Image (spheres, helix red, strand yellow):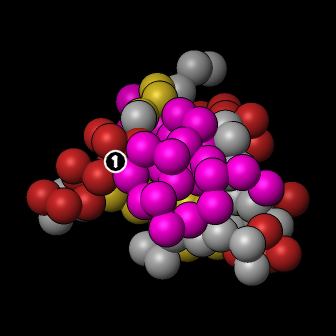
Amino acid sequence: MIIGSMTPQQLKQYLDAGDPVVVIDVRNPWELEISQMAFARLIVLDELPERMDEIPKDQMVVLVCRSGGRSQMAGDFLATQGWDPQRLFNLEGGILGWARDVDPSLPAFY
């Protein structure tokens, strides 16, 4: 299944508008020590099968990792488990893209 993608600027627009969007960070805990989005919920990719029930099926869900690979896998997995692929989005460029395009206070590389 193919999930959608969202640019960092699009995600910022949704957040600024107060639109209901759930952001799931699938990185490892040690990565949060380097860079994190305060509004994102951490569900490590390896824990996703056991923690799927924490992710709503009735809202837009944006998945984030370092640069987009793991979050794409997470979204594809959720789509195969019954989530509507039209409600799942991979953040283009991951948190590094977010740092580059939206929040320059975060490291743009690690």
Quarter occupied by the C terminus: bottom right
Residue 59 appears at what percent x and percent y?
33, 53
The extreme top residue here reads: 2
Front residue of 35 and 65: 35
Give the residue at x 56% y 65%. 106
Q: Is residue 30 above or below residue 56?
A: below
Q: Is residue 95 above or below residue 92?
A: below
Q: Is residue 64 visible?
A: no
Residue 18 left/right relative to 52? left
Q: Is residue 64 above or below residue 37?
A: above
> Which range is magenta?
81-110
Give the residue at x 63% y 52%. 108
Residue 54 appears at what percent x and percent y?
57, 70
- Secondary structure under tag 1 reads helix
**Mark 1 neighbour class, 10 Å CA radius: few under 14, some 14 to 19, many 20 or more:** many
The extreme left residue here reads: 17
Quarter occupied by the N terminus: top right
Name the residue tied to disc 1.
11
Front residue of 106 and 63: 106
Is 51 contained in the magenta span?
A: no
Residue 66 appears at what percent x and percent y?
71, 50
Residue 36 left/right relative to 15? right
Total residue callouts: 1
Residue 60 left/right relative to 20? right
Give the residue at x 21% y 49%. 13
Is 94 contained in the magenta span?
A: yes
**What amino acid does circle 1 point to?**
Leu
Give the residue at x 69% y 41%. 67
Residue 74 appears at what percent x and percent y?
70, 44
Front residue of 14 and 83: 14
Residue 108 left/right relative to 15? right
